Image: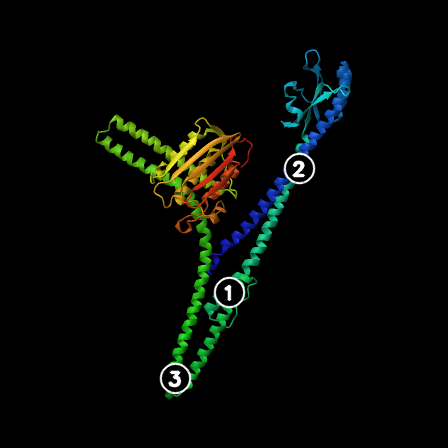
Amino acid sequence: MKQYKRSISLKSAINRAILLVSIATLFISVSISTYVYKQRLEGESAYLAKTISEIVAYNSVVPISFDLRKGLNEFLSTLNNISEIANVHIYKIDASKEALKFFASYNKIGVLPVSTQIERLTYLNKARINNGYLEYAMAIKDPKIGDVIGHVYIRTRLTAYYDNLYDLLKINLLVIAFVALLAFLIAQSLRNRVLKPINNFVQELESASQDQEFKKKVSPIPFDEISVIADAVNELLIKIAQQIRRFSLAEQEITQLNQNLEEKVIFRTKALRESNEELLNALEQVHQYQSQVIQSEKMASLGQMVAGVAHEVNTPIGLGVTASTMLSDRIDDIKSKLDDKTLSAAQLASFLSDSRENTQIIYRNLTRAADLISSFKQVAVDQTAGVIREIKLHEYLDEIINSMQPTLKKYRHIVTINCDESLTIKTKPGPLNQIIINLIMNSITHGFKAMEQGQITINATLNKDKCIVNFIDNGCGIEEKIKQKVFDPFVTTSRGEGGSGLGLHLVYNLVTQALKGNISVVSELTSGAQFTIEFPAYLQENSHD
């Protein structure tokens, strides 16, 4: 029963899997529908603004041509019946100066006037949403001669637009809650349906073993993959019962035999003992197999998770431990010299410099370890939060390489950075740090496994609004069958050597989700590997992970 209780982790796994898949699928669907609905509302708002602008432009031709401000103002006052309109400006082209000047305006009651928009009329030839308002500008043409005689600027309120979005959001949240509850109930039902027959099977098998009631059969399992085991166990129980019955009959026969049959009795007893031992050994093997299957299933799941976390977190923790050890040794040395009164100013200055360098290394790597652990705590995919700021890319790449010096010093590998020192980008430095470190460790662990000195080259360039980073090593390369799924989780060529297969999967998630970019790989056996990362050089503040 103790082994059976360990299967609780399988129940939890079924619940989590169904809940996560259901909620993730619903979230994606809701996000897409919300986006499409938002686009449609924006389109309707823009269409309304354009339609009203066309009407205002048509009715402004005569007043502008004959300078009839009063008539135009009376017409504009009728717009008060349209609740969405907040402000309207009419601009006239001064024929003598060939410049725009303010002609007339309308401001809804309770809405403050806005400043002239002459400088933004060209920009507003397409509807723009700004601070809860939609702005649009249209040229006013004389229908007779086709010349532009002015411009109309309109500013509409989006109150209804936001109310509709809010209502949609409330409905979506209710739907998500309902689906989560439904998924939980389905998970409970599925868990009972799948695990209850298995539980009964284990209990019946243990009962037969403990009570030695081998005439009973275990209940069939309604799953093709597992029913084979139940059938085999039933056959084994039948054989055991038959052997026990034979043994019982043999004992009865032995008691009735004459002393003259002593040799025959000994022969049959020996045969029965051997048969009984074989059956008991077979039953013991069945129990061992059952225990091994349950244990291996549990440990395989735990081992993959723990190995993945350890693989990713071990590097920064190791760097921090190395730096702290060096700092401790230096402190002991300085304390000894201080006690002996042999400490010089130069030695103290050197100690302070080394201490500052080591504490910075410890801080950077502890921070990196915390970021890695935080990354593992988040769902899929894989999402990494970070602060967007401007960085000098060459200087930042140098800092990453410097922070890895305690690890790189163990090898003869060379890392070269080719990047314009003035290149500045606006992105999330944390995910970029993790990406470069994981790629370097991947090259050291896998690419340079059989090399004394490897070469890593990092080329960084700017192409329009895209930052392109090429990571190249001259290692052993990647097999074609591995390369096709190299970014999938748990894909590794070092499974028996501690590799978890999560390193490049984490890199892929950071590039695509945190940096909003993409990554590709080109590699052949014995020809090294090249990873090309492309991401926005100026990431917007409203970008979500």
* Label 2 vs 3, first from the N-terminus: 2
User: Which residue is under mark 3?
Assistant: 264
Please state the horizontal and vertical placement of residue 361, each as a whole percent of the image: 37, 34
- Residue type at mark 1: give it: Ile
Residue 236 appears in the rendering: yes
Residue at 63% over, 43% down: 174
Q: Residues within 10 Å of mark 3 (few under 14, many from 20)?
A: few
The amino acid marked with disc number 2 is Tyr
Mark sitting earlier along the chain (3/1): 1
Q: Return the residue nearer the eye: 349 or 211.
A: 349
**Looking at the picture, how far across and down is residue 499, in whole percent?**
42, 48
Residue 232 or residue 150, whichever sits in front:
150
Q: In which quarter of the image is residue 473?
A: top left
Image-based side of 327 in relation to 159, left or right: left
Residue 417 found in image quarter: top left
Mark number displayed over residue 37: 2
Look at the numbered discs 2 and 3 and tell me whether their residues touch, using CB distance below 8 Å.
no
Which residue is under mark 1? 229
Task: Kindly report the distance in space between the C-alpha atoms of the residues bearing marks 2 and 1.
Answer: 54 Å
Secondary structure state at the residue bearing disc 1: helix
Q: Position of residue 256 (x, y in %)?
A: 42, 86
State the SS at label 3.
helix
**Quick check: 398 above or below 149?**
below
Q: Nearer the viewer, residue 496 or 300?
A: 496
| Crowding at mark 2 (Cα within 10 Å: few <14, some 14-19, many 20+) | some
